[in-house]
Image: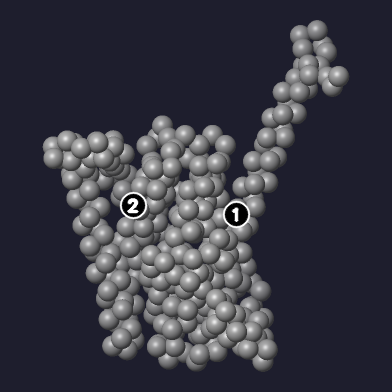
Amino acid sequence: MAVLVFFAARHFATSPWPLAGGQPGVLVAVCLLLLLAQGFKAWGWGRLFAARERPRPLALAAGNGGAALIGVVLPGRFDDAMRVAVVRRYPGCRTGVSALCLSLVVLGLIDSVALAPLAAAAAVLGGGVGVRAGLTVVAVAGVAAAGLLVALPRLAGSRRALRFRLGRWLSSRTTSRRRLSEAWALVSTCWLLRALAAFLLLGTLGVGFSLPRALLLLCAGAAAAAVPIGPAGAATQAGAGAAALIAAGVGGSQALSVTLAVGGLGVLTGAAIFLAAIVWRTGFSLATTGTCAWSPRDDGGLAGWPA
């Protein structure tokens, strides 16, 4: 983090802020696309729970927003802990911590599956040998994740697995293939919206409207996010994205500006959703309390008058 802060401070001492040269209309469109992508990601995550214990979509979106905030200052995987904490503490949540952790593992596999066609397309469209090799690894990992997801319901329901307590627990919480397909479609829509946002952002920041570079930036950040432990979630993704753009022929200063802009907008939209969830729940609680305190009586009076 100290090295990152040093290079960032030296960069901004002689260069403008990353979003200073962007067109306001395009930047607003990028923010709207990222907000919409957050909604589809939360919707897809919700399909991994049984109907009786499924958290509310706003709780899942708030969990993703809190993860974007915590990823700025804490190492990787702390963002997943933040997701679990926010969703579990959200009012009305009937899901346990273990079920939330299991859903995050499955969600990570679905992310890999959704990224596989994007990585394959980026590898076909162009890039150096090293870039294509990295994208091929991402695509192959997505295919392997798809095979695991297809086999998971059968493995969890096998007689050998049901002999053990852990196997019985997994069998009762394994997502059906239909709901896995629905989650995959929603998460894939999320990544497509992010790819479109990256495409617009590259164009407005002077790199050029390049679909291969947008897909490369997206896949590099997602691959860095899958690292078990990194120096910081956002810093690791920014470094991976900048390295990928440099390998694709973008200048170092320009690549750093773009990746910082992408990370900054991601944190901004995540914080907006997180704060919106807090405001919504606070307002709803106050409205409910006010209604209970001043509910009308049959005799025309008001119940709950202050002493």
Are discs 2 and 1 less than 8 Å apart at CB?
no
Question: Does residue 156 appear in the picture of this structure?
Answer: yes
Give 236 or 275, whichever is nearer the viewer.
Answer: 236
Give 3 or 185, whichever is nearer the viewer.
Answer: 3
Give 293 or 156, whichever is nearer the viewer.
Answer: 156
Can you tell which quarter of the image residue 204 is in? Answer: bottom right
Position in image of residue 67 (x %, y %): 52, 58
Other-residue count near label 1 (Cα within 10 Å), few / some / many at <14 / 14–19 / ≥20: many
Disc assigned to residue 190: none
Quarter of the image with the C terminus is top right
Q: Residue at x 83, y 19 (%)?
A: 305
CA–CA distance between discs 2 and 1?
A: 23 Å
Say which amino acid is labelled 2. Answer: Val
Q: Does residue 131 appear left or right of residue 19 in this picture?
A: left
Q: Does residue 158 appear left or right of residue 251 in this picture?
A: left
Q: Does residue 289 appear left or right of residue 151 in this picture?
A: right
Can you tell which quarter of the image residue 216 is in? Answer: bottom left
Which residue sits furthest front? 2
Other-residue count near label 2 (Cα within 10 Å), few / some / many at <14 / 14–19 / ≥20: many
Q: Considering only vertical position in the picture, is 190 above or below 241?
A: above
The residue beneath circle 1 is 273
Disc assigned to residue 106: 2
